[in-house]
Image (spheres, helix red, strand yellow):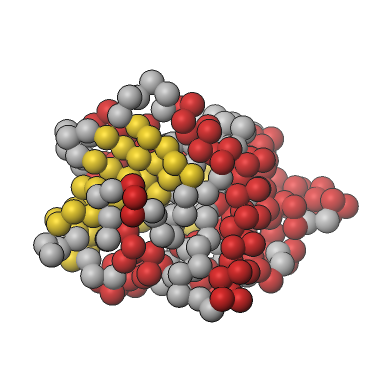
């Protein structure tokens, strides 16, 4: 199954690679940061309920407690951070994009217990300190070495601290068909083998759990919940797609062929009506939680 909608969303670090590969990865991270600097003012601002509900589900699974210290990696504009902050003692957000960091700081300006820093989600700065919980929403599957990243994340957790992430599960028919429309236009670097690995939407929950176990976590558990996303019109879907990581897919389509792509996707959406009007796309979201054992 193809699922490249969110390919460029996340910081890409260089853990476990050769010097040449690390250099290439650094260039890629800079490109991703540049793209999201451009997206930051409009990212997740079209009124579509997508990232918010995913963040709600993550916070529910985390079940944070007063007084806890939480770090949210790949925080973006703060979907998780602003939800978890009122429930804990302090919260730190980290993102690779300076503009996203600025947007997240603005979104959390009314929360005195929030701090947002520019940084690498793959390898968070030890200077940030230790935490009771690490969260990462739609992040891990884009990092070059998920197990290494999870080890670094575990290193930022106190004994019995928890890590909770969200990843995509199986997409509904309409989502899959939309992805397939874009697939022929995508360059090689967007057709990475990781999209078919243990964190791909089609992989079993056990494959995700195994990554955490390999990184030294215990009490690993994954739950899957369906997310029904309503688009009031084709135009709203298109605006949404241009103001998220899916923008990279549009940019891969020659401008002369975009009307054809748009028309094909319009037919897909019309075949998936929402009961309240507009169109509905369904996507399973997986939430994986794990514990850092006592050391």
Q: Position of residue 188 (x, y in %)?
A: 69, 71
Residue depicted at 40% across the width and 49% down the height: 73
Residue extending farthest top: 110
At x 23% / y 70%, what residue is drawn? 216
**Residue pictured at 39% horizontal, 55% vertical:** 124
**Residue at horizontal 17 percent and vertical 33 percent from the top:** 66
Quarter the C terminus occupies: bottom left
* One can see residue 40 in this view: yes
Q: Is residue 265 left or right of residue 106?
A: right
Q: Nearer the viewer, residue 239 or 278?
A: 239
Residue 98 falls left or right of residue 290: right
Furthest residue in direction bottom, as rendered: 18
Viewport quadrant of the N terminus:
bottom right
Q: Is residue 46 above or below residue 263?
A: above
Farthest right residue in view: 256
Determine the residue located farthest toward the front in the rendered image: 127
Total count of labels: 0
Q: Is residue 274 in view from this perspective?
A: no
Q: Nearer the viewer, residue 31 or 64?
A: 31
Q: Position of residue 31 (x, y in %)?
A: 66, 55
Q: Position of residue 180 (x, y in %)?
A: 65, 62
287 or 72, which is in the foreground? 72
Q: Horizontal and vertical percent for residue 54?
A: 40, 43
């Amino acid at each position: 199954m193809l699922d490249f909608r969110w390919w460029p969303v996340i910081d890409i670090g260089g853990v476990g690679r050769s010097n040449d590969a690390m250099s290439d990865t650094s260039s890629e991270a800079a490109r991703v940061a540049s793209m999201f600097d451009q997206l930051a003012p409009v990212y997740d601002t079209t009124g579509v309920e997508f990232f918010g509900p995913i963040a709600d589900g993550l916070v529910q699974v985390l079940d944070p407690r007063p007084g806890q210290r939480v770090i949210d990696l790949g925080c973006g504009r703060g979907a998780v951070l602003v939800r978890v902050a009122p429930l804990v003692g302090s919260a730190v957000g980290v993102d690779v994009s300076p503009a996203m960091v600025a947007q997240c700081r603005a979104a959390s300006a009314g929360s005195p217990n929030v701090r947002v820093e520019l940084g690498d989600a793959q390898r968070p700065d030890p200077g940030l300190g230790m935490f009771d919980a690490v969260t990462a929403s739609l992040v891990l599957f884009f990092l070059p070495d998920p197990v290494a990243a999870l080890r670094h994340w575990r290193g930022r957790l106190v004994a019995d601290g928890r890590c909770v992430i969200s990843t995509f599960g199986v997409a509904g028919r309409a989502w899959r068909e939309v992805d397939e429309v874009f697939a022929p236009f995508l360059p090689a670097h967007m057709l990475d083998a990781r999209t078919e690995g243990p964190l791909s939407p089609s992989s079993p929950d056990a494959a995700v759990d195994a990554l955490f176990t390999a990184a030294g976590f215990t009490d690993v558990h994954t739950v899957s919940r369906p997310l029904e996303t309503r688009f009031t019109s084709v135009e709203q879907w298109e605006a949404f797609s241009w103001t998220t990581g899916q923008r990279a897919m549009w940019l891969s389509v020659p401008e002369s062929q975009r009307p054809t792509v748009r028309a094909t996707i319009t037919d897909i959406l019309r075949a998936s009506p929402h009961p309240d009007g507009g169109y509905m796309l369904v996507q399973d979201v997986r939430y994986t939680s794990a514990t850092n054992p006592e050391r």
